[in-house]
Image: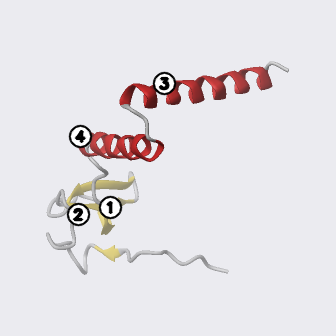
Amino acid sequence: MTKEIPFKIHDLKKEKPTSEQANQSGQVLFWNYKYGWRVGIYAMPYEGDTHWTYAPNDLLKEDARNELIEEERARVFKENGWTIEEGYDQLAIQSLKIAYLLGTKSSI
């Protein structure tokens, strides 16, 4: 039984990647028998690259990730009717409880 690849791998000799096929940073994945897969600018394959496929978009930048964390924190605090101080106290209590339980469980 052969596994199917869930994405198309393009032959670089037959089809070059375009800016529309690149991710938001202008990158695709290139294949080279010597080095394997690598991320590179769509218009700049290395000598020896034979194939390419789509690269995923960049993950959230740190500022966006922190913003999502703060939004989630605010939602949880609001759902439970906690002020900021009460919320952080509750989070600390739960964290310490988990740490204690894990510590006593692993020392038995």
Give how far apart the Cα atoms at labels 1 and 2 are.
Answer: 6 Å
Give how far apart the Cα atoms at labels 4 and 3 are.
Answer: 25 Å
Q: Position of residue 46 (x, y in %)?
A: 23, 56
Quadrant location of the N terminus in the rendered image: bottom right
- Identify residue for label 1: 56
Disc nearer the start of the sequence (1/2): 2
Question: Which residue type does callout 3 highlight?
Answer: Asp
Does the CB distance between marks 1 and 2 fall below 8 Å?
yes
- Identify residue for label 4: 63
Residue depicted at x 39% and y 40%: 73
Disc nearer the start of the sequence (4/1): 1
Disc nearer the start of the sequence (2/4): 2
Quadrant location of the C terminus in the rendered image: top right
Does the CB distance between marks 4 and 3 fall below 8 Å?
no
In this rendering, the label closer to the viewer, 1 or 3:
3
Q: Is residue 76 left or right of residue 56?
A: right
Disc nearer the start of the sequence (1/3): 1
In this rendering, the label closer to the viewer, 4 or 3:
3
The quarter of the displayed image where residue 107 is located:
top right
